[in-house]
Amino acid sequence: MAAREDKQHRAVLRRIARQAMIERDLLPDFSPEALAELDRISGPAQPADESKRDLRNLLWCSIDNDTSRDLDQLTVAEALPEGATRVLVAIADVDALVKKDSPLDEHARQNTTSVYTAAEMFPMLPERLSTDFTSLNRESDRLVMVAEMIVGPDGSIEEADVYDAIVRNRAKLAYNSVAAWLDGEGPMPEPIGAVEGLDENLRLQDRAAQKMKALRRSHGALGLESLETRPVFDGDEIKDLKHDDRNRARDIIEDFMIAANGVAARYLGAQRFPSLRRVVRTPRRWERIVEVASERGFKLPHDPDSRALEEFLTLAKADDPLRFPDLSLVVIKLLGPGEYVATLPGEAAPGHFGLAVGDYAHSTAPNRRFPDLISQRLLKAATAGDSVPYADDGLRELAHHCTAQENAAKKVERQVAKSAAALLLESRIGERFDAVVTGASYKGTWVRIFHPPVEGKLVSGVAGMDVGHKLHVQLVHTDVERGFIDFKRVG
């Protein structure tokens, strides 16, 4: 189709996003009852008594995306003798204001997650809460749940505990600028220099995170890099699509959160409490992963083996770092989706194949994910010696519901991302691109072009194509409303 003269791309994408939410049984707006409850909340939660640990003197900081305002976690570290490190992760106490079965909780339970689309974000909780009253904002006292870990010199967690506390964020930091500073490629971010001792504390956190990552990798954790893109706007017109690369600052948060989620799962198990685990079972299409590796000269074993797969990924990244995100996407598609499962006391839970961990309960983002809010309520009850707040059958139903709704949210995000890509490409019909096959099933064959990083359907020349194959394609059609981008194989 011809490129539209109307350049109000944001408005187009917002309309598409809201309709996609409704079609997938997600709520784009809060109910009058939820808003009325919000109006009755006058400020952040305050400690009910003097029992909470006061950790406001520690050098807490947040590291997140440049534009993030819903701050769920803070981190801090302390050097211990013989190369050990004490790592503390503070998680916003959202349950202190959002009570179980309240109207705000009902909305969160329906959507189960914040939905981040190309032009509009649909928060799981109203922004007055998620970006203010329950957000761990700079120089603000907040109630939290703390996961405390003693990390040994080899990166293993030697001891751990969970408790509630009160903290204060000393610096709001962003991934890219912190990573550039840690790598010696950029200046120290101003908020770090403004807090005495924070620079060395961050370097200590970085060293601990690298040890933890190295240990997980040795156990088979996969070093995958996603190709999730974000639109670049000039006013209301979309001009480009870019993706955020992994970096050392992201690694700090990723490794600490993986560890904290493991601590949460094991703590609940030790207290004979149920938990809501995030799992990725045996890869759905391991045989095709073996073929993809073989096409690149690497032999994987017949049975799924995360250590062998990580060795292949490490070598592939060193051989072709530019194309490694595309290989990562192929492997992610072939591994299959994750899911939530309820694990009752005494039951063995499936592990997380991609992370090479057996105990993993989402608990570190209660402003953004409902499973984390469920985990928080379980942890609070366990630490206080209270009864379990969810019945076994109810927890199983919630696990299934959270999986379904998270999948629906991802489909909304993908649909709007495809509409954004269609807007970007609608003036380029007939152009040719290098591509890689990212999906192949009875539903169709999908390819991703490299520049810009856009995925679309292969509508001609699909014979013999499978995930991971490279080819040349020509753009033949776009449909912004439905997010369709169609290619045909050429050459």
Image: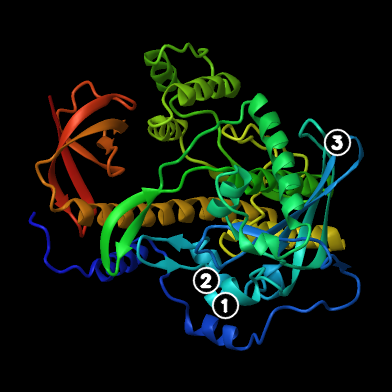
The number of callouts visible is: 3
Residue neighbourhood size for the residue with mark 3, other residues' Cα within 10 Å, grouped as few (<14), some (14–19), many (≥20):
few
Q: CA distance from mark 3 to mark 1?
A: 48 Å
Q: Secondary structure at mark 1?
A: helix
Marks 1 and 3: in contact by CB < 8 Å?
A: no
Residue neighbourhood size for the residue with mark 2, other residues' Cα within 10 Å, grouped as few (<14), some (14–19), many (≥20):
many
Query: With 373 as the anchor, is 17 left or right in this view?
Result: left
Query: With 122 as the anchor, is 74 left or right in this view?
Result: right
Q: Nearer the viewer, mark 3 or mark 1?
A: 3
- Identified by mark 2, the residue type is His
Residue 189 image point, x, y percent? 61, 58
Residue 28 image point, x, y percent? 41, 71
Residue 185 image point, x, y percent? 55, 45
Marks 2 and 1: in contact by CB < 8 Å?
A: yes
The image quarter containing residue 64 is bottom right
According to the picture, the residue beneath numbered tag 3 turns out to be 83
- Which circle's residue, 2 or 3, is located before the other in the chain? 3
- Identified by mark 3, the residue type is Gly
According to the picture, the residue beneath numbered tag 2 turns out to be 107
According to the picture, the residue beneath numbered tag 1 turns out to be 103
Please determine whether, in this image, residue 54 is positioned above or below residue 272: below
Q: What residue do we see at 39% from left, 63% from top?
A: 25
Please determine whether, in this image, residue 404 is positioned above or below residue 286: below
